[in-house]
Each structure stands twice: as C-alpha cells, then as structure tokens.
C-alpha cells in the first residue's frame, strides 16, 4: 500500500510552511471532513487561517480538480511571529461554481512538539425549499432550487424568459432570438467634445441622472462642458465646470455626490483640485492639500473617501514627477490627500470596486503584461491580490454585484509574445480573502476593451480596436453578442440605473465630434 499523500502546502504570510510530513516542532494539524461529495456537492475547498481574534489572514490553501477530496488534512507550523501558544482561527469553505455551499470554523492554540489537532466538520447541504420541489426562477440572479446553478445556467430555464424586453434562455445564455442583444436610441443636444467622463449616481438628488463632464473640444483643448441628463424626464441641463478639464476622473459617493477630480486644463497644465456638483447647477472647486495632480487615474469609493490609483499621479509628498504606480486617498469635503503607497503593478490597466475594497489589475497598454493584482482595503491598506492565471496587458476591469469584479481581454503573454486575448477572470471576496477563477472566454478577443456595469447587473463590453460589443450575464457567467452600433470613438461609457448603458460625446464615423447621446437598452431589437 502506498503511503498517504502529504498535507497540501499553504501560501503563508506569518506561518512557516512544512517542508515534509514529519511532526512540526510547534503547530496545529487540521482535518476537514463531512458528508459532502467532492465534484458533486462542491468543486473547491478553501482553508484559511487567521490570527485569533483578528481578521488578518495568515495562510490560505485551496484544493480543486483532481486534488479535491475529503477528509483533507493541512499542517501549520509555528514561525517567528506565531510562536507556540498563539491562538489561531481556521475556516474551511466548500464552494460550487463560486457559490459557498458549506463552511466550518474552529480555533486551536499552536503547540510544541507533535502540535495540536483541530477537526472541522462541514455540515451537509441544506435541502432546497419544499424538500426539493422548488422551481428555478430564471430572471433573478439566484439559485432558487438549490442545485448550484443560477438562471440560464440551469437547464430548467431553457427557452424561459430571463430578462425583460424579450430575452430568453438559449443554450445556457440569456439572449435574443437573433443572438444580438440591445436596442439603441439616439438623443440630441449634448455638448460636442471627445474623451469626457460620465457617471450615473444611484442615490442622492442626481439619482438616475447621467452626468457628462469635461473632455476636449474640436481643437483638442480641455473643456468646461457639463451636461446633466435627467433620464426619468428626458430633460437636459447644460452647465459648466469651474475650470476646463480633460483626462480627469469621476466618482460618486454613498450619498450620491458627484465629483470630478484632477485632469489638465488649457495648455495641458495639471489641475490640482476637485469639483463637486451642487444642487443649484453650479460646482464647488476644492484644491487638493497637499498639492496633488492626477491624470487618467482609476477612481472609486474608499469608505467615505475617494481613492485614486494608477494613471499619472504626482502628490507633493513624492515630488513633482508623475508616477504610474501610486495610490492616494482623498477626503472629499476638504481636498486633503494622503499617499497610501506604491502598488506592486508598475502601471495598472484599470481598477474597480471589489466589495468594500478597490482592485487593480493588468498592465497599462504598451507597458507589458502582468498577472499581478493589487487590492486596496477599505482602511487604505495596500495588499497584493491573487495572481491571474495569465499575464495581461490592457485588460478591462469592472465591478460586479455581490462583491465581485471582472477582468477581461487585452493582450495575453504567451511565451515571449503578446497575443490578443478573449479570456475572462472573476475575482470575488470571502471575508478578507480574494480569490480568482477563470470563466468561459468571450466569443472573440478584444484587445482594447472597455466595460461598464448597468444598473441591472449586466456588463457591456466594447473594443476600441473594432471587435463587436458584447454583454456579460453575471448570473449565468456567460457572454452574449450585442447588437452592432454606429461607429463612435473617444466617448464616455456609463452604466444606467436600469438595463441600459450610455455612450456620450466622442467622434462619429466622419471623425467629427458628436452632439448626441447613444443609449443602448438591454432588450431585443
């Protein structure tokens, strides 16, 4: 009989890995067991160790594929920061298709010589509602019948309605009978400019209104144009920023406030301030303190503050030279800024919220591919996230509902070459741990992708290099083709409050600046 396999090695931060199967000088031996069937009830088993009484992860191990089995054993050994006598908490999580099916946790004290022992018993899966008699609802993003499959991913939903507007499930995908999803509507009267920023707040006095700010005019000069389109009434209000801005960032806060940050003004001089939209139609300009300039940075909420990361940042604390790998926290009301530190990615391609944190991934176009990800915690702590299964240059990064994010497209490093990529990766949080898994690829590579989430949770993906648009259904985790649209470049892309996305500004097929807004609704044409 062959000897039993060694317990799997863990990715450790403050604990040392076991180098062999013999007893550790000090540590704990963890056994995970339960009535679940590997591969049927769950397809991934994760075990995380924390310092007792904290949320600081010390070690993470994951079993999947051929390595998946129960019971499973894991060894932790004492290190300099976790000597014998240290209390640790251990949590085991069984998942299927990214959905947690069963979890168990316990505590143990690291012991000398043979070490302590801890057994975690995963509870059985709960029965579906009505003892398994429930029927899958195909349009709510939930697993209603308890089989681990949501909406169109469940075969029960074939040919059933999955979204308003005529979409039905077909082959596991929520789509239209003609396989191209979306109905475009053109609206007139917007300021002509290219490369503006745009956002649709979901709360506050501007809830559901499309805000389009700044950009460049027909001569390439930064613009003060500020359009607010009230989608519920189709009313357009044309206003002006306090200063002209191009290459700015835009963000909404929890209270619905909208801010335009940084950018450059006339003669491409950096603008060291932010502007907040006021109820009376004006704006309030707040200088950054200490001085900060920002161009093209990824922006998002960080608690009640704003985080700027990547792009070209030059905080006074770091000198006057722009850097591509900085993260800065800004207090909206005062403009006070704090340098959080340097990212591990030399120049991130993009960023998006990931639960209460902020994710950055991929390498900037032209700077090389990277598999690294960075995660900025809600308290401003910089951390290195999980590596992507492939090194990417220029992917799109977009947030999803449920504390998840999507990284798609760009170029993929294959040997010494960069090749167009159709690959897609889902990042999700489980407590303080961030995990990544690969999804089914897009229908075609998209080498200059941009993506935005609509209010119903779906994501629209476009490609500046000409690949057709596509939608991503977060419930089925599948892509479906979007209806072809008129050519438009250098525009802003924003997700609406419902099942629509907006294309604002930019140039049309003749190269001239557009004064129209293109609204694409998620329905069958």
Image: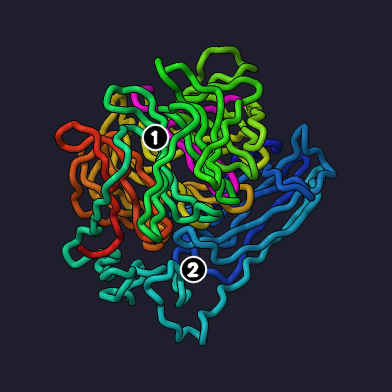
Residue depicted at x 78% and y 49%:
52
User: Which quadrant of the rendered structure holds the C terminus?
Assistant: bottom left
Specify the label residue 50 is tagged with: none
Specify the label residue 225 is tagged with: 1
Residue 239 versus residue 470 in the image, above or below: above
Residue 279 versus residue 317 in the image, above or below: below
Residue topped by disc 2: 41
Snapshot quadrant of residue 337: top right
Residue depicted at x 61% and y 20%:
291
Viewer can see residue 261: yes
Which region shows up in magenta? 341-367
The residue lying furthest to the right in this view is 85
Residue depicted at x 70% and y 38%:
15
User: Which of label 2 and label 1 is nearer to you?
Assistant: 1
Look at the image and say whether residue 374 sits in the magenta stretch.
no
The residue lying furthest to the front in this view is 280
| Viewer-nearest residue: 86 or 510 | 510
The residue lying furthest to the top in this view is 320
Residue 373 x, y percent position in the rendering: 50, 36
Position of residue 401 in the picture relative to residue 303 (left or right): left
Total marks in image? 2
Residue 324 x, y percent position in the rendering: 49, 22
**Spatial CA span between label 2 and label 1:** 55 Å
| Viewer-nearest residue: 503 or 172 | 503
Residue 159 x, y percent position in the rendering: 25, 75
Q: Is mark 1 on a helix, strand or loop?
A: strand
Q: How crowded is mark 2: few (under 14 residues within 10 Å), some or many (20 or more)?
A: some
Look at the image and say whether residue 362 sits in the magenta stretch.
yes
Q: Is mark 2 on a helix, strand or loop?
A: loop
Q: How crowded is mark 1: few (under 14 residues within 10 Å), some or many (20 or more)?
A: many
Q: Which of marks 2 and 1 is nearer the N terminus?
A: 2
Residue depicted at x 16% and y 63%:
178
């Amino acid at each position: 009989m062959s000897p039993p396999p060694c317990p799997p090695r863990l990715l450790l931060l403050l604990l040392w890995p076991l180098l062999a199967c013999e007893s550790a000088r000090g540590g704990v031996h963890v056994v995970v067991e339960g009535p679940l069937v590997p591969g049927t009830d769950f397809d991934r088993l994760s075990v995380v160790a924390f310092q007792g009484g904290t949320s600081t992860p010390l070690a993470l191990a994951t079993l999947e594929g051929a390595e998946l089995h129960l019971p499973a054993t894991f060894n932790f050994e004492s290190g300099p920061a976790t000597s014998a006598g240290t209390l640790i908490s251990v949590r085991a999580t069984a998942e299927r298709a990214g959905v947690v099916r069963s979890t168990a946790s316990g505590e143990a004290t690291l012991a000398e010589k043979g070490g302590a022992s801890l057994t975690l018993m995963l509870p059985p899966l709960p029965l579906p509602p009505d003892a398994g008699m429930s029927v899958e609802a195909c349009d709510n993003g939930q697993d209603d019948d308890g089989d681990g499959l949501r909406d169109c991913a469940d075969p029960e939903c074939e040919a059933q309605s999955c979204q308003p507007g005529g979409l039905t499930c077909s082959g596991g995908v929520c789509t239209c009978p003609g396989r191209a999803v979306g109905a475009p509507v053109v609206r007139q009267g917007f300021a002509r400019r290219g490369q503006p920023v745009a956002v649709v707040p979901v709360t506050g006095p501007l809830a559901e209104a499309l805000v389009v700010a700044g950009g460049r005019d027909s001569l390439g000069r930064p613009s003060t144009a500020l359009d607010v389109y009230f989608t519920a009434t189709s009313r357009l209000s044309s206003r002006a920023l306090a200063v002209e801005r191009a290459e700015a960032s835009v963000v909404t806060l929890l209270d619905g406030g909208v801010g335009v940050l940084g950018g450059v003004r006339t003669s491409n001089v950096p603008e060291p301030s932010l502007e907040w939209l006021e109820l009376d139609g004006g704006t309030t300009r707040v200088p950054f303190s200490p001085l900060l300039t920002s161009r093209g940075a990824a922006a998002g909420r960080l608690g009640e503050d704003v985080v700027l990361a990547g792009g070209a940042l030059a905080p006074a604390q770091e000198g006057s030279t722009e850097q591509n790998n900085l993260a800065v926290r800004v207090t909206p009301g005062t403009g006070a800024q704090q340098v959080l530190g340097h990212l591990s990615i030399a120049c991130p391609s993009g960023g998006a919220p990931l639960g209460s944190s902020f994710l950055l991934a991929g390498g900037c176009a032209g700077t090389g591919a990277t598999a690294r990800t960075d995660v900025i915690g809600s308290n401003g702590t910089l951390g290195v996230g999980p590596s992507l299964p492939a090194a990417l240059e220029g992917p799109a990064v977009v947030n999803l509902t449920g504390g998840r994010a999507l990284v798609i497209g760009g170029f993929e490093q294959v040997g010494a070459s960069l090749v167009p990529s159709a690959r897609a990766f889902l990042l999700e949080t489980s407590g303080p741990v961030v995990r990544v898994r690969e999804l089914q690829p897009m229908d075609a590579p998209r080498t200059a992708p941009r993506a935005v989430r609509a209010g119903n949770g779906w994501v629209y993906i476009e490609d500046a290099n000409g690949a057709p648009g596509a939608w991503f259904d977060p419930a089925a985790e599948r892509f479906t083709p979007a209806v072809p649209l008129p050519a438009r470049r250098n525009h802003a892309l924003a997700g609406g409050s419902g099942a629509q996305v907006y294309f604002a500004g930019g140039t049309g097929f003749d190269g001239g600046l557009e004064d129209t807004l293109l609204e694409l609704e998620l329905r069958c044409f």
